[in-house]
Image: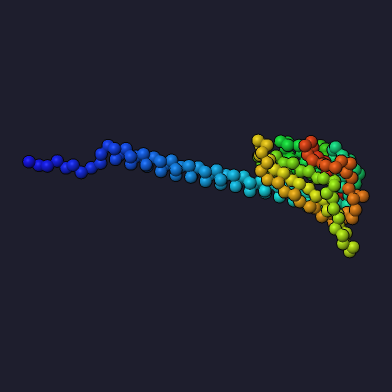
Amino acid sequence: MRKLNKKGFTLVEVTVTLAVFAILVALASSIVVSGGNIYAKNANTVKAAQVCDGVYDVLNNRLSFATSIDFTKSSALKSPDSYSECIKIAKKSEEPPVSINREGRKSDDGTYEFDEVCDTGAFDITVSCKKEEIAYANNSKNPMTVLPFEVEVFSSEGEPVYSRKCLIELLNIKSDDHIKMDNNLYTNKNDLYINYTLAQ
């Protein structure tokens, strides 16, 4: 008479093995998901930093060579000087967020040309400048005015993502007599217009 083969797994062993396997799969899934979230957050921060640097570049490239700066106007300065320009930093959620209005350059329909110079994508930005933080370099050969800005980048939900404090060296302005500011803090909680004149 042939003996039955009693080798194999019992129901309890199979159940325990499946339970352990399910736990391992759940752990692996959570690691993959958390890794993806960390990557997305880092990528978001990197993009926000690029946006912040782009806004700073616009401010630095234009204002560095200004001979006068006026924060007090509520719109682009209507000046006959063809070298006058205005950086408009729009209040949050408006497009384009950062633009340059060049006086003396009109489009075919007679309106002033308004160029988008910075694409912030899904982010909102806030740019602020404090009057009390304006400083001067004490160099008798080349005295230089320094204009401090803070650029903050927010997600579409209003969460802060990235910020940068930056100093812009004003190469053609030797004193604050050429910087008009009647408030201590200028920011684009509403539209912020920075009117300035470039050296001819």
Q: Nearer the viewer, residue 41 or 13?
A: 13
The image shows residue 12 at horizontal and vertical percentages of 29, 37
**Residue 75 showing in the rendered view:** yes
Instruction: Tell me the residue at 85%/42% (across/down).
Output: 184
The quarter of the rendered structure image containing the C terminus is: bottom right
The image shows residue 172 at horizontal and vertical percentages of 87, 55
Q: How is the image coloured?
A: rainbow
**The image quarter in which residue 188 lies:** top right
The image shows residue 88 at horizontal and vertical percentages of 79, 41
Instruction: Tell me the residue at 90%/63% (across/down).
Output: 140
In-image side of 173 versus 37 (left or right):
right
Q: Which residue of the protein is positioned furthest toward the bottom in this rendering?
A: 141
Q: Which residue of the protein is positioned furthest toward the left in this rendering?
A: 1
In-image side of 123 versus 198 (left or right):
left
Q: Nearer the viewer, residue 189 or 138?
A: 138
Instruction: Tell me the residue at 40%/41% (across/down).
Output: 23
The image shows residue 144 at horizontal and vertical percentages of 86, 57
The quarter of the rendered structure image containing the N terminus is: top left
Instruction: Tell me the residue at 89%/55% (across/down).
Output: 174
Q: How many marks?
A: 0
In-image side of 167 versus 157 (left or right):
right
